[in-house]
Image: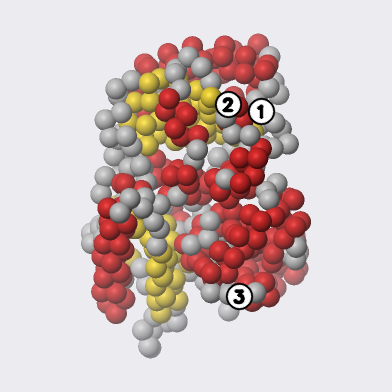
């Protein structure tokens, strides 16, 4: 930790820089994280009129984790109710409400929070007004324990400055179609991702997706429309319509965390240059994403192109099989030969949690035993390349890379 006066003065200066530069909030949060340590520091805002998640940024926050929370785990987060009741004058420390026995049994802690390296959360409301509510939270691991008193005192000295800056720049935390949280997260993903309407209008293509357009003719964008080969286009649009109907029905039944994925395997026409592209897609609706992607239903498309992808990351596995980020990590550890007990110890969760997640992985990947699952993972495109990169294999890496391109 660095709780020096020099660090304090630097953070205060960064806080007021945010009045002229929205991006300075990230620099401020990075500096706070360096000062107090811990797993991560997160700031989020909720639009008062729509109740939508209107701002999300932080230090040491992975975009896949944010997306997974928005799409699924927000609905079972036991801290949400407490935060809503919390006044702007105090802090909510989750361990004062949820002890270790609760965390050992609750799926939010076992499947999401602890596997991502966080157990303890201390949060406060910086502003609560009709326009927006803005929250600052500090996350710490099981080994680190709750936020120390000296770090809390340091944050309390900073709070009046943060509150003043948030109030003066409140427009930054109000819902805006120009700064949607989900769009910002998609832009950070390494995997090619597009957001499109159910009718094929492209709302967003991240940098990786734009690069993909130059490497394949199987997907293109023309006049703002997603263009697929004729024999796949009708099937894609039909499945989008089915997904929207299913999701809307689930929402009407009060099932807000419903998430169904579809896949499309496209090949070039006979006589054309051989090409293959995989598309994995799911429906996003305002009701089950807190409006983070907009106020109309959107389709999130993940692409995998065998000749251009460098590795398969958790975002692709989630899209391909519906695995959660924690399940992807367990599958990877199993592929590395780790027994379930070791995985549970390393992740800091209960053995039964890992066993239940393994059963979920089997179901989602249509496998029945660990050897089948490992064989599937090891035969996914680029898996060998990913393992060679992890092993630092020099000449071996060059040979694997050459082989994967053929």
Q: Read off the residue under disc 2.
A: 93
At x 61%, y 40%, the residue is: 102
Question: Mark 1 or mark 3: which comes first in sequence?
Answer: 1
Location of the C terminus (image quadrant) = bottom right
Residue 3 quadrant:
top right
**Dot 3: element:** loop
- The answer to whether 285 appears left or right of 28 in the picture is left
| In the rendered image, the vertical position of residue 107 relative to residue 316, given as above or below | above
- Which numbered circle lies on residue 146? 1
Residue 159 coordinates in the image, percent (x, y): 51, 15
Q: Read off the residue under disc 3.
A: 368
- The answer to whether 147 appears left or right of 307 in the picture is right
| In the rendered image, the vertical position of residue 404 relative to residue 42, given as above or below | below
Residue 376 quadrant:
bottom right
Question: Mark 1 or mark 2: which comes first in sequence?
Answer: 2
Location of the N terminus (image quadrant) = top right
Q: Residues within 10 Å of mark 1 (few under 14, many from 20)?
A: many
């Amino acid at each position: 930790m660095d709780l020096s006066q020099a660090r304090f003065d630097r953070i205060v200066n960064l806080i007021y820089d945010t009045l002229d530069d929205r991006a300075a909030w990230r620099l401020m949060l990075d500096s706070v994280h360096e000062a107090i340590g811990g797993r991560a520091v997160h700031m989020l805002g909720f639009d008062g009129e729509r109740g939508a998640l209107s701002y999300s940024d932080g230090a040491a926050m992975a975009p896949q984790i944010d997306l997974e929370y928005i799409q699924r785990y927000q609905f079972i987060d036991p801290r949400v109710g407490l935060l809503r009741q919390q006044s702007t004058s105090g802090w909510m420390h989750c361990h004062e409400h949820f002890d270790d026995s609760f965390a050992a049994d609750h799926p939010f802690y076992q499947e999401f929070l602890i596997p991502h390296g966080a157990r303890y959360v201390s949060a406060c409301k910086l502003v609560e007004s009709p326009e927006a509510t803005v929250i600052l939270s500090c996350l710490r691991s099981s080994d680190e324990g709750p936020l120390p008193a000296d770090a809390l005192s340091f944050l309390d000295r900073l709070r009046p400055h943060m509150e003043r800056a948030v109030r003066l720049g409140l427009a930054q935390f109000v819902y805006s179609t120009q700064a949607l949280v989900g769009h910002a997260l998609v832009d950070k993903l390494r995997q090619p991702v597009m957001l499109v309407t159910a009718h094929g209008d492209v709302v967003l293509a991240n940098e990786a997706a734009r690069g993909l357009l130059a490497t394949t003719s199987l997907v293109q964008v023309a006049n703002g429309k997603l263009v697929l080969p004729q024999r796949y286009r009708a099937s894609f649009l039909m499945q989008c319509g089915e997904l929207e109907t299913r999701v809307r029905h689930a929402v009407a039944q009060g099932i807000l965390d419903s998430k169904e994925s579809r896949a499309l395997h496209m090949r070039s026409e006979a006589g054309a240059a051989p090409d293959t592209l995989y598309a994995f897609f799911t429906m996003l609706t305002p009701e089950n994403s807190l409006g983070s992607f907009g106020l109309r239903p959107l389709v999130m498309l993940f692409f995998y192109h065998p000749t251009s992808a460098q590795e398969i990351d958790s975002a692709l596995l989630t899209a391909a099989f519906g695995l959660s980020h924690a399940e992807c990590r367990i599958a990877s550890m199993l592929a590395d030969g780790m027994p379930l007990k070791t995985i549970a110890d390393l992740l800091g969760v209960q053995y039964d949690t890992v066993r239940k997640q393994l059963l979920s992985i089997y179901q989602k990947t249509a496998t029945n035993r660990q050897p089948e699952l490992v064989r599937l993972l090891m035969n996914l495109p680029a898996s060998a390349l990913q393992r060679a990169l992890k092993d630092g294999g020099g000449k071996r890496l060059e040979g694997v890379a050459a082989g994967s391109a053929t």
